Image (cartoon, helix red, strand yellow):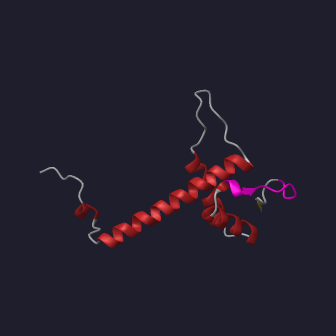
């Protein structure tokens, strides 16, 4: 017999657990993508290759940044607040400040 994909193969049989796992994956994906968008626009744009595509996709660019910052263990309050704001706000609301050489941020006034 061929074993097709079904929910029993994953050993996740509780609907609520599956729903919670997918929700956490979606939140993580959105956070990484928004961080990649922000970093591409405000900090360091990605290079466009000869075929017209970016050298990395925005999700990977943001995921690498989040991984570097969260796993370094030496997060300062400014970096923590920036990552939380990127999680909660659109990337266009944050822009780099000149005083910190492109690594700080300020919220755009409307």
Q: Is residue 64 visible?
A: no
Q: For residue 11: magenta? A: no
Q: Quadrant of the C terminus?
A: bottom right
Identify the main secondary structure in magenta: loop
Q: Which residue lies furthest to the left in this view?
A: 1
**Residue 18 image-quadrant placement:** bottom left
Q: Residue at x 63, y 50 (%)?
A: 37
Q: For residue 98: magenta? A: yes
Q: Nearer the viewer, residue 40 or 76?
A: 40
Residue 50, percent from left and from top:
62, 27
Q: Which residue is drawn at 67% across and 65% down?
A: 85
Residue 58, percent from left and from top:
59, 47
Left or right of 2 on screen, residue 79: right
**Residue 53 image-quadrant placement:** top right
Q: Which of 99 and 55 is in front in this view?
A: 99
Q: Which residue lies furthest to the front in this view?
A: 110
Residue 13, percent from left and from top:
26, 69
Residue 11, percent from left and from top:
27, 67
**Residue 23 image-quadrant placement:** bottom left
The residues colored magenta run 92-101
């Amino acid at each position: 017999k061929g074993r097709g994909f079904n929910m029993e193969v994953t050993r996740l049989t509780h609907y609520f657990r599956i729903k919670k796992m997918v929700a956490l994956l979606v939140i993580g994906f959105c956070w990484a993508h928004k961080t990649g968008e922000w970093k591409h626009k405000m900090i360091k744009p990605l290079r466009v290759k000869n075929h017209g595509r970016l050298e990395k996709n925005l999700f990977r660019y943001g995921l690498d940044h989040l991984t570097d910052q969260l796993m370094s263990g030496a997060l300062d309050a400014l970096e923590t607040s920036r990552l939380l704001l990127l999680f909660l706000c659109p990337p266009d609301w944050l822009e780099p400040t000149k005083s910190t050489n492109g690594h700080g941020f300020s919220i755009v006034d409307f």
